[in-house]
Image: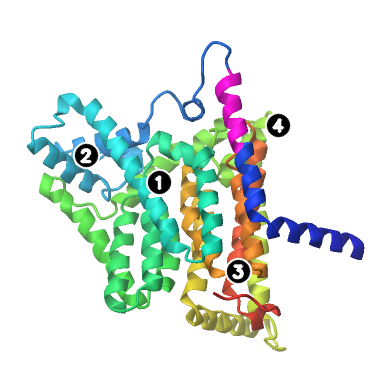
Amino acid sequence: MPEQQSALMRLYRHLTGHPEIIIGLILLLSIYTRYTITYFGNPERLVIPDQYYQGPVRGNDWRMTVMDQADRVIAGIKPDLSMGYGYGFTLPAVAAMSAVRSAGYCAPASTGSCTYWGYLLFVSSALFLQAGLMLTAVKRPEALKIAILFFAVFLLGIPGARGIETGNLDILLSAIVGFALIGSLRSPGRPRLTSLITGLVFGWLINIKLFIGALLPAVVFAVPQPAFAVAGILIGHVLVNTLPALFGIMPDYLFPLSTSLYALAPMSEALFRGYPHGNNTLLGTAAGMVGALGFSGTRTGNFFTRAFALLLGIAVFVPPAAYLYRGISRNAGSIRGIRADFLRTAGRGAGLLRRNRENTAILFSAAGVAAMNLIPAMAYDYRLYYALPVIYLMLNRFAPGSDGLRLTYLTVYLFLLRTVWILKGRTMNIFLYAFFVMILLTAVRAYLPADHTGKKRGHP
């Protein structure tokens, strides 16, 4: 057993000691599988992997969720509930479309060409923001090299390419989330104003996609003045849902919740009838497992789907939670009674929350990213864009040679293996779920100080 442990330790240190080589190999694998689809899939024509994965229409999400909804608001009609979007992005699109039309362009009859040019502008802006986020978040020269290579592999892989292909808003919103978190952590002065602006930004974002609310705990602990952040979130929410009155639409302050619930109900039932390919949630993956057993769409299949989803959730979230509790309660002393021990541990955890905002933000951001990708009924690959700012913060957080940085490298490897172009292989979700376990464990490692882990940790 000691020899096996030492061999595993040597392998671990070798893999994490040369991240550029490992990521480079994953890059070659991603390119090879992508070219395999392009040139060897059909003997009569070339196949574009992005379209093969998504469908025949490029920018479909952009057209349905932005352009079509903006036209409805301009006409004084409430946005379509089935799209699952609030007013947050529709209103800026309405302002831009109205300005362009007042200049004599983009008439309703030419919506197709406007959608195309709007899609190009949107994707280009999103990618520039993503690159800017990486350069802003990662300050260490050695970590920046890894981050650049990581970003390139991600964009070439399935999640990055699919977000670009569909024109989904997540490729832009995830960058805005990253800038808001980093700005609140590194703002040198004006803590109240910084906290208020960060709250306003997230109040606006939640009115675009409600699941971004999973990152609210990270926001509250990242800002220097949490009360001002909460006030900003409420003000942003009320403001975004009041502005539609300018177009004759009655304000509806529960509209973001209504859209999410409307979209969730039919999707959850569809999961039990068949496996929507690319859906990475606990229910989606469990439905695929049940479908492979031949029980899809049956009452037995529904039961097994929920049971498998629960087991997957336990496998992902319980180990990091146990590690967190063990780290907080370490050396807490002998206390009689479960209640007293819990209160003592909670008190130590609260002390850690106040000790380092960046570590706390990393922990809650990782938990939020895992929750938004796994807990809903439907979440496709482009939602993995929200993991990028968390990985950048981790790369920048740990010192060279530290255990935390090695754990971060393993997290990156698992994440990038999910980007390989094996389109119909559900087994690739094994790497995705392992990634969520690893990113949570690494976030806990960043959150716990040395005296709670028993090991010395590198610091920037």
Residue at numbered disc 2: 70
Locate residue 69, reporting x and y percent. Answer: 25, 38
Q: Quadrant of residue 226?
A: bottom left
| Residue at 28%, 78% in the rendered image | 190
Of marks 2 and 1, the one in the foreground = 1
Q: Earlier in the sequence, mark 3 or mark 1?
A: 1
Q: Earlier in the sequence, mark 1 or mark 4?
A: 1
Question: Mark 3 falls on what kind of element?
Answer: helix
Q: Earlier in the sequence, mark 3 or mark 2?
A: 2
Residue interval drawn in magenta: 30-41
Residue at numbered disc 1: 171
Q: Quick check: 275 above or below 305? A: above
Question: Mark 4 falls on what kind of element?
Answer: loop
| Residue at 85%, 59% in the rendered image | 7
Question: Mark 2 falls on what kind of element?
Answer: helix
Q: Let me know if residue 370 is in the magenta part.
A: no
Which of 431 and 316 lies nearest the eye of the viewer? 431
Residue at numbered disc 3: 444
The amino acid pointed to by label 2 is Ala
Q: CA distance from mark 3 to mark 2?
A: 42 Å
Q: CA distance from mark 3 to mark 1?
A: 26 Å
| Residue at 33%, 76% in the rendered image | 227
Image quarter (top left, top right, bottom left or bottom right) of the N terminus = bottom right
Of marks 3 and 2, the one in the foreground = 3
Q: CA distance from mark 4 to mark 2?
A: 44 Å
Q: Earlier in the sequence, mark 4 or mark 2?
A: 2
Q: CA distance from mark 1 to mark 4?
A: 35 Å
Q: Earlier in the sequence, mark 2 or mark 1?
A: 2
Question: Mark 1 falls on what kind of element?
Answer: helix
Locate residue 247, reporting x and y percent. Answer: 12, 45
